[in-house]
Image (cartoon, helix red, strand yellow):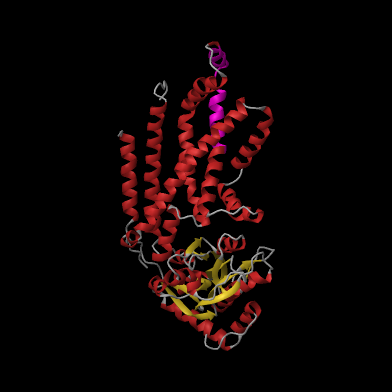
Amino acid sequence: MNRRTLLALLTGAVVISVAQAPLPAHADALATIEKSKVIRIAVPQDFPPFGSVGADMAPKGYDVDVAKLIAAKLGAKLEIVPVTSANRIPYLQTNKVDLVISSLGKNAEREKVIDFSVAYAPFFNGVFAPADVKVSKIEDIAGKSIGVTRGSVEDLELSKVAPADTSIKRYEDNNGTISAFLSGQVELVATGNVVAAAILERNPPKRPEIKFLIKNSPCFIGMNKNEPALLAKVNEIITAAKADGALGAISEKWLGAKLPTDL
Amino acid sequence: MTYVFDYEWVFEYWPVLLKGIGITVELTLVGGVLGISLGVFCAWVRSLGPTWARPVVTAYVEMIRNTPFLIQLFFIFFGLPALGVRMTELQAANLAMVINLGAYSCEIVRAGIQATHAGQFEAGASLGMSRIQTFWYVVLVPALQRIWPALSSQVVIVMLGSAAVSQIAAEDLTFAANFIQSRTFRAFEAYFVSTLIYLALAITLRQLLRGLGWTLFPKRTVR
């Protein structure tokens, strides 16, 4: 090969090997937030009632209200960063956001890479389908197609317990999953119970009626590991909000029900 | 917080990667062959074909060239079922790629056809060649020879654009990378490996197309 190609390849190799060096550590997140008075929180935009946009393009939802509560208690300006189920943990890992409040469920694999606060919202994952699809337990979905959002708790749980000949279709975000179900590309959909309720309210062409529940997986706030000060502060704010009724009010507003006592 | 790179997790999922590579290669092959055939047909219609058909083909070409591939894909997969046309994600992906490459290659091949000197048609007729023979030997093959580098570039562009089919859950290489990232939380390793694989596939495809050009058009005067 000629000299220019060789030079290009060498430069590429050097850049790649330099990029492999471990990144330097950064300052304590809570201290940074308190000093800069800005907190960046990731919320969903495609998952009503937890996060969606109104006609005025302003984010609204359960998670958005909790984000505003935390920012107010920390005395910091809230910067909302919209994310999808697939990229919310990478956004946290690459320090694009300080907290993830995005109907995030807790499981062992996620525990290895991020930390979770105490629970702030109830959430049940289930399988939904129109009335004429006869499914009542996990074995019944054999041979059928089911849509899930990649990387969500439904995806992980379903991949563990679904029969081998189920066709699991993983979409990049909730929009894709819901579009696939509504257009009939998949027969069933696995999502949250309140999300299915929100869809039913809008009189859709295919009605996602509950067939069975997969897991009771409440929502937790996600943050990077090794941030004990931030974790303690967020837990303190959530526990106080449960005690003084602020969280209960958010639950009544968005889920139409009181907070469960065992949350 | 330090980030330590760890590639072992990525290789645990090599069946997913392999399937992704297979799907991407299949999409490129089918899309390439059928897309170029469609492109040649449309180019013929627009330059030498029946006048009544030209507005139809022009509308198709302009609509595809002036809209994003992702929107075309979503329309075929999520939109058509409302009209009763439902297909699997692989069928939708293949169809979208053929339609997309068809439109772009129509314009590329048409440029090659229109660069044919008017005297060539007369020369063919004077040798007693039928219209079909004239089109094939005198117009089309030299035209393809002329535009071969541009056409192979377009095929590689469409191959790289096939990454969009991961959005409709077609399990191509991009889907494999996303899947590995969602299970291992190792975004850098997963995407770095898939980038290298795409690079290797694109370079291989370019070389294959160059070789194909030399085999099909041995009398090329311009290399």
Q: Which residue is drawn at 57% across and 59% down?
A: A185
- Please state the horizontal and vertical placement of residue A205, each as a whole percent of the image: 67, 64
- Please state the horizontal and vertical placement of residue B130, each as a whole percent of the image: 55, 18
**Measured along the vertical axis of the image, is residue A102 above or below residue A247?**
above
Q: Which residue is drawn at 30% across and 43% down?
A: A10
Say if residue A64 shows up in the picture.
no
* Res. B217 image quadrant: top left
Q: Which residue ends up furthest to the top in the rendered image?
A: B126
* Res. B204 image quadrant: top left
The chief SS type of the magenta part is helix
**Measured along the vertical axis of the image, is residue B66 above or below residue B127?**
below
Whether B115 is among the magenta residues is yes
- Please state the horizontal and vertical placement of residue B22, each as a whole percent of the image: 40, 50
**Measured along the vertical axis of the image, is residue A203 above or below residue A248?**
above
Q: Is residue B6 left or right of residue A160?
A: left
Q: How many marks?
A: 0
* Res. B219 image quadrant: top left
Q: Which residue is drawn at 53% across and 82% down?
A: A238
Q: Which of B161 and A246 is in front in this view?
A: B161
Region rendered in magenta? B103-125
Q: Nearer the viewer, residue B68 or A249?
A: B68
Question: Which quadrant of the figure contains the N terminus of chain A?
Answer: top left
- Please state the horizontal and vertical placement of residue B179, each as a whole percent of the image: 43, 61
**Measured along the vertical axis of the image, is residue A164 above or below residue B84?**
below
Q: Residue at x 34, y 40 (%)?
A: A8
